[in-house]
């Protein structure tokens, strides 16, 4: 658990800073403190939760000027290279950029932190950049739970652009969509095998599709793909906020087309500020997260009941083999509390 | 609460049949008893839940030969006319067809039952057809909860084709997709205003898109739309079960193209039986519904706590106005138990 950049010292995650130290550190934009705060929020230990709650109630209110961007795409689409170039562009423009990566695979490999450092080499060296993986926390429906909190902490620490990166293959995207202002989908040219693995339903959530790797002889194919996707997007139901999704072609390798995407995000921003959707959406998102947290907490309490997991597993097997119907199984589990 | 067809007598929903009467009635395929059973399952009263559970444990096991079809489309797309013709076709082929309609608007208007009778005039007169609206039950995330149970009861009563009809504008479709074998999306030709209102993400769930109202001078436009949608579907991520979605053109008015859709469903069926996906999917769906029921029950218990709704409402307002962040609000509500 490091901030991925300037880990001045190793620390025992159980020994957290004091509330005052946390608050002054975060308000000063200290990345090490910021990283520790995120670790604190990931803890389900009652003492930690208490400290986390005190902390979050005393942090600066989220700044409405911040831009929250979700970026997704299958492995191999070039997410890291894109974010590297995109992040460097934003830095040059004077922004402070926080990148929160959600990688379900990191649960298994544990190699994500080193991975983030390596794969965003130049970006991770920037003073105004904070890169942090957030674990997906398995089966409790808690995907993105800590990510939403992490956004608030990063914003309190003065980061004005928050990028949430996911791999687009899991359940996370629907939740990601509930915490960002803009959703960018990276895709490869060619609608064949490369697309396998992206979750159905994600394409329609995109505010922008960027076709990556338009270089090394791939340019024409990328341009063709742009036209195809543009036509396809017309078939989708319109966005409630009136935004018409854009399609761009880019190359991180040639550093081409990256600024077009930023311009599109700014254009989208202007539109949703003007028509009031930004406020409305964030307000609805907050209510969503309040309810989400309540329901999660109810589940956490339930699954903490001794031996309940064994009961569930056994009932699940009976349901799978058709021995018992799902509703009876559920009632049986609930009675076993 | 009637079965929409042969309501021989009015009954007080509180006075249910006995367990034995229910079971013999359902096993005999009696539509009045079937309808009462569905009403029983909609009740959250503990006595009713107990009877419902006893009932469901004693019903015949769900028949693997049944075909569960989800049909959705925006108001105006011609769902009723389509289901009328489609259902009549299935009747002619000797099937027993149950149609469960989920119409969120019926909560307000209460006019859906009469509506179903009127709008599927010929079909509702058929001996082997059962039409029943199921309420969406508001905010508890219970959309489709009773619908899944209703499927099991209809199957026990000998209906071999179950059609779930929704309007495609709400949250229901994701859940519907978790209870059917095949998902049919009805669309109008022309990708303009007519599409407004269909929820984003639904199109990618479709196993088949049927372009309706290909009549009265609309034929050419419908054929063009078919090509466009066919091309667009190629861009979507492939189905996990290997099925390539089909696009058809049909006219309920001219009774044209309806059998093509049934042939596609049969083709799909053959494929998913052969590759094992039918069993796998139903098994996964059952585990989903078991967990769904547990989580719902936890929520029901929570929301039944005296005054909790007032606390939630007040916190929700504070979250909306930015007075408090969503996580603190959730903790406040949870502490208020």
Image (cartoon, coloured by chain):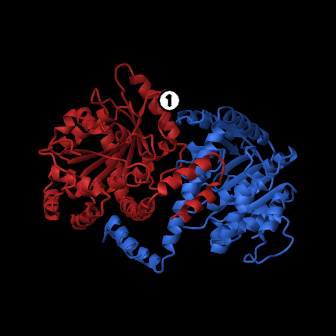
Chain colours: A blue, B red
Q: Quadrant of residue A15?
A: bottom right
Position of B222 compared to B48: left or right?
Answer: right
Q: State the image coordinates of residue B178 (x, y, percent, origin top left).
A: 41, 55
Front-most of residues B48 and A140: B48
Name the residue: 67% across, 40% down. Answer: A221
Front-most of residues A224 and A125: A125
Name the residue: 41% across, 48% down. Answer: B138
In this rendering, does residue B275 appear at all? Answer: no
Position of A294 compared to A79: left or right?
Answer: left
Per the image, label 1 sits on a secondary structure element best described as loop
Write down the residue under mark 1: B191
Q: State the image coordinates of residue A123 (x, y, percent, origin top left).
A: 83, 56
B225 is higher (above) or lower (below) than A318? above
Front-most of residues B44 and A268: B44
A95 is higher (above) or lower (below) than B23? above
Name the residue: 55% across, 60% down. Answer: B333
């Amino acid at each position: 658990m490091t901030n991925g950049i300037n880990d001045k010292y190793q620390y025992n995650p159980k020994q957290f800073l004091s509330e005052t130290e946390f608050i002054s550190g975060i308000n000063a934009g200290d990345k090490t403190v910021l990283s520790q705060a995120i670790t604190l929020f990931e803890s389900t230990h009652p003492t930690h939760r208490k400290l986390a709650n005190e902390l979050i109630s005393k942090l600066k209110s989220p700044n409405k000027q911040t831009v929250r961007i979700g970026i997704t795409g299958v492995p191999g689409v070039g997410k890291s290279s894109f974010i590297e170039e995109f992040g460097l562009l934003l830095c040059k423009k004077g922004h402070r950029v926080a990148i929160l990566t959600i990688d379900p695979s990191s649960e298994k490999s544990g190699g994500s932190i080193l991975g983030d450092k390596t794969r965003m080499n130049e970006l991770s060296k920037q003073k105004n950049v904070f890169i942090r993986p957030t674990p997906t926390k398995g089966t409790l429906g808690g995907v993105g739970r800590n990510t939403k909190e992490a956004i608030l902490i990063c914003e309190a620490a003065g980061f004005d652009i928050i990028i949430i990166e996911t791999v687009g293959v899991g359940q996370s995207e629907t939740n990601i969509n509930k915490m960002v202002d803009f959703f960018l989908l990276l895709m490869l040219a060619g609608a064949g095998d490369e697309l396998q693995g992206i979750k159905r339903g994600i394409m329609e959530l995109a505010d922008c599709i960027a076709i990556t790797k338009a270089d090394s002889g791939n340019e024409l194919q990328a341009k063709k793909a742009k036209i195809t996707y543009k036509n396809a997007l017309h078939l989708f139901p319109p966005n409630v906020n009136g935004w018409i999704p854009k399609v761009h072609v880019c190359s991180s390798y040639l550093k081409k087309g990256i600024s077009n995407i930023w311009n599109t995000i700014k254009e989208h921003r202007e539109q949703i500020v003007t028509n009031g959707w930004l406020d409305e959406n964030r307000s609805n998102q907050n209510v969503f997260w309040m309810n989400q947290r309540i329901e999660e907490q109810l589940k956490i309490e339930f699954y903490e009941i001794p031996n309940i997991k064994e009961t569930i597993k056994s009932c699940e097997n009976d349901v799978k083999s058709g021995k018992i119907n799902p509703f009876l199984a559920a009632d049986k589990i609930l009675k076993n509390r």
